[in-house]
Image: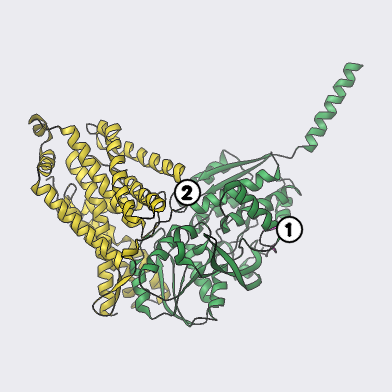
Chain colours: A green, B yellow
Amino acid sequence: MRKFLAGGVAALALMTAGIAQAEPVKIGVITTLSGGGAGLGVDMRDAFQLAIKQSGNSEIELVVEDDAQKPELAVQIAEKMIQSDKVDLMTGIIWSNLAMAVVPNAVAQDVIYLSPNAGPSALAGANCHPNYFNVAYQNDNFHEAMGEYDNKDYKKTFILAPNYPAGKDALTGFKRYYKGELAGEVYTQVGQTDYAAEIAEIRASGADSVYFFLPGGMGIAFMKQYAQSGVAIPVTGPGFSFSQDVLPAIGDAALGVKNSGTWAKDLDNPANKAFVEAFQKEYNRLPSIYAAQSWDTANLILSAIGKASVKDKDAFRAALKEADFASVRGKFKFNTNNHPIQDIYVTEVVKEGDVLTNKIIATAFTDHGDAYADKCSM
Amino acid sequence: MSLALLIEQFLNGLQLGVMLFLIAAGLTLIFGVMGLINLAHGSLYMVGAFACATVAAATGSFWLGLVASLAAAAAAGALMEVAIIRRLYARDHLDQVLATFALILIFSEGTRWLFGSFPLYLDIPPLLQGAVALPGGGQYPLYRLAIIGVGVIVAIGLYLLIGRTRLGMRIRAGESDREMIAALGIDIRSLYTIVFAFGAALAGLAGALVGALQSVQVGMGEPALILAFVVIVIGGIGSIKGALIGAILVGLVDTMGRFLLPKALALMMPATQAGPVGAALASMLIYIVMALILAFRPSGLFSART
């Protein structure tokens, strides 16, 4: 009898343990951890890992791989993650050309992909997909905001971006709202580090301002060379050109520059305060916008895991779409094309003590969606 | 299009060429003397930039940083030669490529481990800040002019070193017949180490000079290395003179292509298309030039080995 009882208790204990235990979820993270774009990917990965760690959910397994900012490598990693690691969800890609190479194929194999950064226009319109969620922005958004804001101060702008999907989206977005004249429109190489030829053209163009989208090391190189060139035309840009990962390397040349973004570390909401504090404590540096978007992506996933099983794709997609999580950006909801509707701010680079950082000075758009949602038939 | 803009773009091309020459000179010297393909040359360039940024941040002096970049790159080069490269001279080029590619990974990860993934801050020294007036009403950054100056000094210095000194004589002898020079009692092993360290120091100098202009970060060496290889292939592998001419040709073609191609295409198609198409074509231009030169002169313009 005693034996029987003990066995029964043990069986019961096992059963309850089975209920209390969360189901295992495997998330594939493909991001840029080496080369010139590594700063962005490292911030993305660190914030994601920290959010998962803080959740205390030990059943979530991360498979993190470095794409070296190479599309062909990203495709190989994605295939490996889907075929042999059998991941339930994928995320992490920073660059739009890599997202274009990976995402359509992954979502077609019924893997849910959540973008923590890249938002190419080609995936937002007619080619939108129920398995593709963009937690960051549609590529045009930040540039639309700055185009709108620049109408106030400038009449003749010289615009500049790298020659890849996000660069083209950037200038398209800027032009959609900017009403002034264009003094010039130049596309540079991705990863270019010397901008002498472009700066010479800016000097000769008679522009009253320069708008440039150059994320990562490209922006550092451009700003340093621009500051030395003797050209005094003011610059503006999207937040990517002046985010926390590049500001220390640009130095004082960035002071006072206005740029656009959905997030800044002084954004006043409890989720953001907790995030900035936790990130600084863990990694001893200020988070960038890439870290913020990645943090939101992780928390969105955690919120959906709490509501539905990741094996039940329909229920899980519905749970994701509710966007029931505390975003560090304050307001956040999904549009019909699974891209965000959110506020976009204008920030200015300021110095706090010795540290360069961004401070919100205006709101460019409230509840802003994107220009492609109408073409999405979801 | 004004004269001032043309002059400025010409100087930009020249400056890019000079920068490439500093990297390519060491690469071609090492290939010419030892017959070694060193893919890790770009890592030595990165070592120079990081040494300069670290010392400049610690002492506040760019000039001390510059000295440190020469010393650090030369030391890293010498160490690399003695520990690893020395074992590769007798092996074929595939082994050399594999081993030096492994060195790239080791240098990159080592640097990431020490300094992290985020770019370091390195600014131009106060003495060279700002721009100077050009004839025709333009302006040009003083620092870029200084880089052109450094390139000219290095080119003249190399010419004198190779043509007029005992060390240069040994280097030339080593290029043409290494068994004979060893038989004549020259310590070929230490000669190789010296040449390797010297080539590394040139790469380190280039890294420090470029670091102040661009961003100091892990992986900065590989794009520069690819261009340096284009330069030495065009110039003729092993020839310093070829490296100089090839570098300036690549610098001018690249800069002028980026500047003029979108403008030329805008005459034929709408401006919104001309921009991206011109940019795409411009990025191919130097490789097209390389292919054309190789079609007519398969061993490059001034090949040292015929």
Amino acid at the residue labelled 2: Ser
Mark 1 and mark 2: Cα distance apart in space: 35 Å
Amino acid at the residue labelled 1: Glu
On whether residue A331 falls in the magenta region, the answer is yes
Q: Are marks 1 and 2 in contact (CB under 8 Å)?
A: no
Q: Is residue A287 left or right of residue B179?
A: right
Residue at (29% x, 77% y) in the render: B138
- Provide the secondary structure element on which disc 2 rests: loop
Q: Say which quadrant the C terminus of chain B sits in.
A: top left
Q: Is residue A164 left or right of residue B290?
A: right
The secondary structure making up most of the magenta span is loop
Residue at (29% x, 62% y) in the render: B285
Quarter where residue B61 is shown: bottom left
- Please give the residue where the numbered disc 2 appears in the rendered image: B117
Q: Which residues are magenta?
A: A323-335
Give how far across and how far down residue A167 sits, in percent.
Answer: 47, 65
Quarter where residue A274 is shown: bottom right
**Residue A115 in sight here:** no
Give how far across and how far down residue B176 sits, in percent.
Answer: 10, 40
On whether residue A364 falls in the magenta region, the answer is no
Pointer 2 chain: B
User: Which mark, residue A322?
Assistant: 1
Q: Circle 2: is it few (<14), some (14-19), or many (20+) Cα within 10 Å?
A: many
Q: Say which quadrant the N terminus of chain B sits in.
A: bottom left
Looking at the picture, tell me which residue is in the foreground, A2 or B50. B50
- Provide the secondary structure element on which disc 1 rests: helix
